[in-house]
Amino acid sequence: MSLGQLLKMLGLGAVALTLGVEWVNWLARRLRPWRGPQGPLKEVLFFPSPITCTEHLYSPDRTSPCLCPLPHGIDTSFSRLLEHLLSACVSLELCVFSFSHLELSRAVLLLHGRGLAVRVLTDRDYMSITGSQIGALRRAGICVRHELSKVVHMHHKFALVDGRKLITGSLNWTATAVQSNKENVIVTEEPELVQPYRDEFSRLWEANDPANHNHHLPSSTATKGWHQ
Amino acid sequence: MSLGQLLKMLGLGAVALTLGVEWVNWLARRLRPWRGPQGPLKEVLFFPSPITCTEHLYSPDRTSPCLCPLPHGIDTSFSRLLEHLLSACVSLELCVFSFSHLELSRAVLLLHGRGLAVRVLTDRDYMSITGSQIGALRRAGICVRHELSKVVHMHHKFALVDGRKLITGSLNWTATAVQSNKENVIVTEEPELVQPYRDEFSRLWEANDPANHNHHLPSSTATKGWHQ
């Protein structure tokens, strides 16, 4: 075989290999729907969750290992919930009946400290019960509103991460719910599910703007509704 | 067969496969409208819901119009919830913290009366509170179990219709939740969401089988756990 023929063969081989790889990739992409469901994130978490160390989630780049006595390096429902929450880059909208969980409060404060737009909507009666973290959030400068009506409960338990990831379920943000109760949480980026919750948050946020209700309420109550 | 013929055959085979896959994909796209415009059902319902007449949902074939004073012919979150529930043909699994809503109880009793396999799992403390419908369900012969632990709550609020439609959210099955509170419910047939809830129901149903726990409990308590 002459050098010319060898070069020609090598060149044709390279082209054939390139086209072949491209074709196999194309085939894999086209066949994907038959291989199973893909598409937006859909995750279900059940509780109670074991208590494990979640320090690494608050500061992923820390180099020294945590020395606390809790189990380390274990994925739990709670660590997944925390991870999803801490994945926020732009905003967090939180619509939760009862909020007393210290670690979840720490996560929300951390996101606020990073400069994210954090808004919290909660129930009126659960604003100031023992252990409620709402006061701590407000003192840190986070926008908080509560259901203004005295007779109905704001019983939602959902969060919107960057406006595109929905976290929703039966779980109140309390230690009892996380560690003891039988609870469920759906985490999804399915637009058909996320959008209605975005609309609901906007609607409730506006409806519970105390500025629009001052004339209906005694001044002390109206002030309670102000954020910060 | 010469190398040339082999290459020609491989080339023709690749072209045929490419065209074939494209054609099947095209066919799948064209047939999609018959399977549902957006894939599996995903619906979000928000509460409170206005009170309207829902008589037609219990007996769709009745010919005489309802004469009750409530508004008629209006779709509400509650009527949608009821419709989804009454769409059951085979089975209903219900896992709900608190159940006192009369119309929802009527729907569950109706499904039981039609011969569907109905199973209800509920919280221990909410079995016999005022207005609870759990007693009525048990008296009708429906299988009911409750969380056996004295210290944790079964706080789920979900239902599985025919094992393939999931109804889940913040909504307890009470009149206050339906008519007053701010609540949310997701209704979906998305298998990735439905399957985990099916597994959770099976797990909790078995875990709360009083037959497995009789020796741990006083007889009166153990008996409470039996269905019917």
Image (tube, coloured by chain):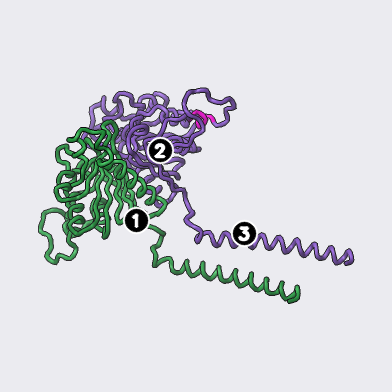
Chain colours: A purple, B green
Amino acid type at image mark 3: Asn
Badge 3: how crowded within 10 Å, few (<14), some, or many (20+)? few
Q: What segment carries the magenta color?
A: A54-59
Q: Nearer the viewer, residue A152 or A210?
A: A152
- Does the magenta-highlighted stretch encompass residue A57? yes
Same chain? Circles 3 and 1: no
Q: How far across and how far down the image is residue A201, in percent?
A: 36, 42
Q: Is residue B162 magenta?
A: no
Q: Amino acid at mark 2?
A: Glu
Q: Is residue A4 above or below residue B163?
A: below
Within 10 Å of the Cα at label 2, are there few (<14), some (14-19), or many (20+) other Cα atoms? many
What residue appears at the point 50 percent right and 30 percent down from the top-left corner?
Answer: A72
Q: Which mark is residue B164?
A: 1
Q: The residue tagged with tag 3: helix, strand or loop?
A: helix
Q: Quadrant of the N terminus of chain B?
A: bottom right
Q: Quadrant of residue A227?
A: top left
Q: Residue at x 37, y 35 (%)?
A: A48
Tell me the residue that label 2 is attached to. Answer: A93
Residue A33 x, y percent position in the rendering: 50, 60
Q: What secondary structure characterizes most of the magenta part?
A: helix
- CA gap between label 3 and label 1 equals 34 Å
Q: Chain of mark 1?
A: B
Q: Position of residue B86 (x, y in %)?
A: 24, 57
Disc sitting over residue A25 in the figure: 3
Residue furthest to the right: A2
**A202 or B139: nearer the viewer:** B139
